[in-house]
Every structure is written in C-alpha cells, then in structure tokens.
Amino acid sequence: MWRPFLIQSQLTPAGREKGLGEYFREEILKLLLALALFVLVPRAARSDDNLVPLARPGPWSGVSELIGYAGRIWFVNSVKFLDHNSADVYSYDPVSWRRKQRIGHRKAMVDIPGGAFLMGSDDGEPAERPIHRVVLSAFSIDRFETTNAEFGAFVSATGYVTDSERSGVGWDWDGKWREIKGADWRRPHGPASSILELERHPVVQVSWNDAQAYCRWRGKRLPTEAEWERAARGSGDRTYPWGNEPPRYGTRYRASYGSDKCCRADAGDGYFFTAPVGSFPLGRSPFGVEDLAGNVWEWVQDWFDPGFYRQSPAASPVNNTMGERRVIRGGGWGNNPSGLRSTLRHANPPEIGLSMVGFRCAR
Ligand SMILES: [Ca+2]
C-alpha cells in the first residue's frame, strides 16, 4: 500500500511504539514540508494567465499563509492519525485549497475606477454604432453572475415569486427561443429539469423585474449598459473581456459558450448549458470580473433603443426612456463566438424569463 511521506502512525514499521525524539523529528519534518509548500504552491496557483492581482499582499501575509499551511497539514495528518482507513477522504490538495483561499479572500464585488472609455463598435450590428467616448464615475460590480444559491436565499427570505412562476411559462433555447410551459428558475428547461447540484451555476429564467428585485434586496442595483461594457472592456480597446483572441485556443476555453457556428448549446467547454460561475479564469476582464462573456446573458438597467448611441450623453449614459425591451449583454451557453462580443446589444421584454439569461448586480 502507498504510504505518504508524512508519518501517520504512532508505531514504527516494526511495530514498536515511537519515542518522543522520533515524534519531534516527524513534527519538524512536517514543518519543513509546510515551508516547501509555502514557497512552491502559491507560484503554481498563481500561474493563470490574465490574473489581475487585486490587492498587494501586506508584510505579514506571508507569515499568516505559512501558519495556515502548517496548521492545515498538522490537522490533516492528525485526522489520518486517528483513522488510517480514511486517508483518501482527507487527501490534501494544496492547489485547489489555495485557489479556494484566493477566491475567498477576494472581494465579491470588483471596484471599477471612474474614467473615460470608448463604447460601441463600428464593425458590429447597427445598434452598436458609432464608437463614442463615455465618462463614468467609479462603481462596483459583482465579480460573478448571481447564482441559484444566492437567488434561492432571496426567495427563502422574502417569499418572492418570479414572473415565470406567475405566468407559468419560460423561454428555452435550442437554436431558437421556444415558449415552455412550467419552465421557471427551479426548472430552467421545463418541468423535467431541475437545479439539483447547480447551486453555483448562474440563476436563469429570471425576468428583468426579478433581477431588479434581487439586486434591491441586496442593497444594490443592476449595472447600466455603459457600466457593464466598461467592466468588460476597460478603456474600450478589445472585442472580448480578455482581449481580441477567440474564446478558445485548442482545448482551453475562455468562456462557457455554444457551437463555433451559430448557435446551439455545446459541451466542448465541459458544460452543455451553464457552467459554475468563475470556471473560466482565462476569460476575466481587465478588472478581474468573471464570465462577462458567455455562460448567461446579463440583464442591465437600460431600456433598449438601437439608436441610443447617436444621441446619448457622454457622462454616465443610461436609457431610462420607456421602451418595449430591456438590454441584455455578453452572450451565453448557446451562442457562437460573435455572440460573446462585449459591444453586442440584444434585448428582451422585461417580464419574461429565459434559460440563457441571468444577471449580476452593481453599486
Ligand atoms: Ca455572462
């Protein structure tokens, strides 16, 4: 049987009880191993391209990390000590643990500095034209799309009933939109579907009204269309949040999206429909916001007006003039790469839920 190099038994291989000296030698060995992990693991864990460090580590962060590693190794081995048969259960995966720590330490919202950027595109659909300079104040935006778990907490706390539940229909995408009876946020593709084990996936089948209600409950609001595009494009010099390269190279994906030719669900990225939020770190925006391109389209505050860019104000534009549809941004699991472009503007009636549309909040 394979034995880890860390000591798991109070007995020597020969069956003799270990002395105090042997015990302390083992503890020192564990500490040295912790030191080695401290030096090697963070480097491995930080090797993602595009990773934007959000905070500089303080002078004591190295020490606290070291204590954290040593403590965890000690704990894991103590547990093994008690029950050798469960060694696999407690197997130590320092990289994924380090990742969890990193996500945990990073704020749930990303601060976007105020400033000017170029909004729109002259190459895309007519509604994306013209490219124009926009100035925004600083704001914060959720790092991830709102998940089923988060939306579930809102429903539990408030008894909120979504538009799809009220109307009894939602819309599902299979190459085109179809009205499905009994589709709602708990059954995204109809009565036979569920969100079992999809807690960290983005919530879908939520209308603009539902999204707005959730953000208010969290003390937030929906981002404006301009804020969303600024979060995705930085100064406005890129097609996608990560740059101008296509959303995958080889088998490495930068987003959860559909077939390369328009426009069906596809499991090439590892997920046929939605993916857990934050699954594609290579697709982060210049500010570190995740999944802006792909996974689900995201409701934003504005009413849709295809001619808005021709007369919108330069400072903090938002179209509050009532129309028929609200803007959605970013593309989703059933779109081809062109549908993921950060300047693309689509829209839907504000009172319907769709299986490829979710949201995130801003403040
Ligand atoms: Ca998205």
Image (cartoon, rainbow, N blue to C red):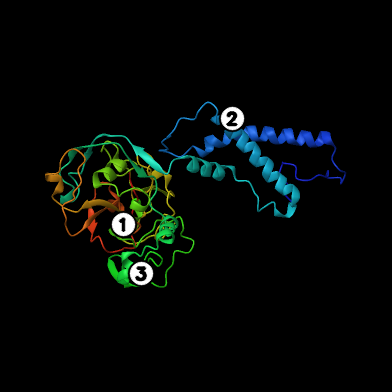
Give whichever of discs 3 and 1 has the lower sequence position.
Answer: 3
How far apart marks 2 and 1 lie (CA) works out to 46 Å
Q: Is residue 117 above or below residue 128?
A: above
Q: Nearer the viewer, residue 42 or 360?
A: 360
Name the foreground residue: 163 vs 102: 163
Disc 3 designates what residue?
183
Disc 1 residue lies near ligand 1 with CB under 8 A? no
Q: Find residue 335 and name its label.
A: 1
Relative to the observer, which residue lies in front, 284 or 215?
215
Considering every residue shown, the one lying at the far top of the view is 59
Quadrant in the rendering for residue 191: bottom left
Q: Tell me the SS state at disc 2.
A: helix
Which one is earlier in the sequence, the residue at label 3 or at label 2?
2
Q: Dot 2, crowdedness within 10 Å: few (<14), some or many (≥20)? A: few
The x and y percentages for residue 328 are: 26, 54
x 74%, y 35%: residue: 27
* Mark 3 vs mark 2, CA separation in Å: 51 Å
> What x and y, as percent, mark residue 270?
44, 56
Report which quarter residue 143 is drawn in: top left
Reply above or below: 173 against 34: below
Q: Secondary structure at mark 1?
A: loop
* Mark number displayed over residue 247: none
User: Which numbered disc, 2 or 1, marks the residue that appears first in the sequence?
Assistant: 2
Q: Is residue 244 visible?
A: no
Frontmost residue, 191 versus 286: 191
Q: Is residue 81 left or right of residue 61?
A: right
Residue type (three-letter) at the residue carrying disc 3 = Ala
Amino acid under disc 1? Asn
Give above or below for 18 relative to 349. above
Instruction: Report crowding for label 1: few under 14, some 14 to 19, many 20 or more residues within 10 A (C-alpha).
Output: many
